[in-house]
């Protein structure tokens, strides 16, 4: 059983569950730190497990395909061994980065031709070969190749794009069934709902995806610039269609508030570069609100970085010290902020899970959202 | 008793000892990781103690004076509390950075006027006020203001400069005696031998320094571009004059080989940015020789980073993985290399100490020097 649904909240669509993988269990709802190119930026692997309490991390197929490359990962025995990470890994398909990073990309029925953002070399991603790549990576959860539509996106483009994503999915599902894992552990394959911000397209896409019978399903193309209400409306609509007994993964989202609202709408899995990327710029998410640690107001605040934080960095370092590190461009500042933010995100979803179990998720969530919107 | 001389090697000038400070004991010979601006770059404080086994770190007065500044450090209760480091700290006087980093510097009998490399603001360092600054920093060992002569340096300049350094020292010693520590722990004050590569100047300077009766003495102005034989010749000459019952600190040196040769010549303390700076560029020092981890030859070498290394990074990460991190410009690569190199330097001086105790230091050192010169 890939996913076990455990507890359903009475006042929202929130639920808890357990995902079972060849590299262990994942308690949902869960946030997945992004380890773009075989490293969660500035964070040691043991910090992910011991300090951040990560249960699963995400790797980007586009980046891993370019560096270190498929053959090297295969020679290493897969990404887990290459980076010495023995918990679950999810990989995206590479599609998103093809559209956001590469140059001269060209879509066709066959797939996506693009030039590497590193050396300009030309490559083709197809629904089939991104599965081959993810087999070589050895991720526990592989994603289907899709086109992530930009925002705004006109209706006709969104519809045509969705149809392309669906036809790619059919080829992908067939290839998935016809190929085997390389390293002895099972690899799940998640299809992705698209359809931009159009209700009828999202509905059609969710129905199509639901029919595939995958062990888990994802929602893509959100948090790409649309108003938050649109995102929540699409998510709500899609989650009502996607099967209840399969985990639902909202890709690339988002702020702590987005995650809590996403959980309330029945979403189980999240990933985002925000905790690490914003952390490297000095933004800290805390239980009392958001801090820009570079601000003058923290210059002589010698109190603990985050008295309510769960990671050792929160108690070891003061606000004044971390501000100093950022002002002096010291790498350690980025390391501390990344650990802090990731630990905060993981504690946030853990607390969400506890409150779903205890039956007071919605009131807790509403109170938390207010706090999370505060700028300290 | 600030310094206890313990064991003297029979075949060289090497010796072991213990330095006693208000923040604990330091077993010599010792290497001090450089924490320029209140952070050993890319290394957490607990990694310094737990993984690297650092016994003392060095802070740069010039950098700390500019950022976070003396007042903030005083408000924090000193550098130890500011950065949450409760082992000993040595600070330099700031003189070296004034000459190497700042703009429009101007020396006079009074002191050194310079412009900040950060914002161009104008400052004056005097023999007295660098002690005041180091009092506010609260370092366990403070250094006297000196002029570090460049290389090459003509005889007249070297002589005049040495005399300036000596006259600054007399003022510094007086000010040191007339001021008190701010945070309740003792602060030692080390004078510095100068004299470029001129034997008579080095001899005169060492004699002058020895007469001051400081609890420890330093040798500056070496490893600034002169041939290594000159450095060793000067060091040998100076160490024969500096009192045997006081620790001898060779400033800013150097390679692992420099350190072993320095120990053989009777030196007890070393600091250098090399393990961290070169580490951030992918150079790894190992017991089998030096590695440029960015080289193609490590691309598919999945063996441990350093099978003979003492830090967990050596066993946790493979050469291929660390090479990948450097090729992909991942911060984690710099973190791993910094921990590895610092742990190597600390293990090197620990092994030197053990071999002095066991009486086979010279033969061990000669064998090690051969290995350390190998490029893998």
Image (cartoon, coloured by chain):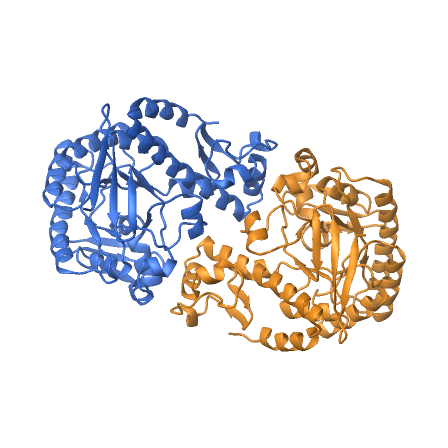
Chain colours: A blue, B orange
Residue A91 at x, y percent in the picture: 28, 51
Q: Is residue A293 left or right of residue A240?
A: right
The residue at the point 71 percent across, 52 percent down is B25
Residue A320 can be seen in this image: yes
Q: Is residue A86 above or below residue A53?
A: below
Q: Is residue A268 left or right of residue B112?
A: left
Residue A329 position (above or below residue B350) = above
Q: Is residue A353 above or below residue B6?
A: above
Indicate left or right for B119 with B98 as reference. Answer: left
Decide which of A366, B25 is in the foreground and name it.
B25
Residue B78 figure quarter: top right
Spot occupied by residue B238 in the image (x, y as percentages of width and height): 82, 67
The residue closer to the viewer here, A49 or B177, is A49
Q: Position of residue A18 (x, y in %)?
A: 25, 41
* Total marks placed: 0
Rendering quarter of residue B73: top right
Residue B84 versus residue A261: which sits nearer the camera?
B84
Q: Is residue A144 visible?
A: no
Q: Residue A368 in the image: x percent, y percent? A: 37, 25
Residue depicted at 84% across the width and 53% down the height: B214
């Amino acid at each position: 059983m890939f996913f076990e649904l455990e507890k359903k909240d009475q006042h929202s669509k929130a639920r808890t569950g357990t995902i079972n993988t060849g590299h262990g269990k994942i308690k949902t709802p869960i946030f997945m730190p992004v380890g773009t190119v075989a490293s969660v930026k500035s964070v040691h692997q043991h910090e992910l497990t011991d300090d951040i309490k990560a249960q699963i991390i995400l790797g980007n197929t586009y980046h891993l395909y370019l560096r270190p490359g498929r053959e090297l990962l295969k020679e290493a025995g897969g990404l887990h061994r290459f980076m010495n990470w023995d918990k679950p890994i999810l990989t995206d398909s590479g599609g998103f980065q093809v559209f956001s990073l590469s140059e001269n990309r060209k879509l066709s029925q066959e797939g996506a031709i693009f030039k590497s953002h590193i050396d300009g070399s030309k490559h083709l991603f197809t629904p089939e070969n991104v599965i081959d790549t993810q087999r070589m990576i050895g991720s526990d959860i592989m994603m289907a190749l899709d086109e992530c539509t930009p925002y705004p996106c006109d209706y006709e483009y969104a519809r045509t794009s969705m149809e392309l994503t669906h036809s790619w999915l059919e080829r992908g599902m067939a290839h998935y069934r016809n190929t085997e894992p390389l390293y002895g552990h099972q690899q799940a394959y998640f299809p992705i709902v698209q359809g931009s911000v159009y209700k009828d397209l999202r509905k059609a896409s969710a129905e199509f995806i639901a029919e595939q019978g995958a062990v888990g399903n994802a929602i893509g193309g959100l948090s790409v610039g649309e108003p938050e209400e649109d995102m929540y409306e699409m998510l709500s609509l899609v989650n009502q269609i996607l099967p209840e007994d399969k985990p639902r993964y909202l890709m690339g989202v988002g702020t702590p508030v987005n995650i809590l609202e996403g959980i309330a709408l029945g979403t189980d899995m999240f990933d985002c570069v925000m905790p690490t990327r914003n952390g490297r710029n000095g933004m800290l998410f805390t239980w009392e609100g958001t801090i820009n640690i570079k601000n003058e107001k923290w210059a002589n605040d010698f109190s603990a970085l985050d008295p309510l934080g769960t990671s050792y960095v929160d108690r070891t370092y003061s606000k004044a010290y971390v501000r100093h590190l950022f002002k002096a461009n010291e790498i350690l500042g980025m390391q501390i902020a990344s650990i802090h933010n990731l630990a905060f995100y993981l504690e946030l979803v853990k607390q969400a899970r506890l409150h779903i179990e205890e039956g007071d998720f919605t009131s807790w969530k509403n109170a938390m959202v207010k706090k999370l919107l505060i700028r300290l």
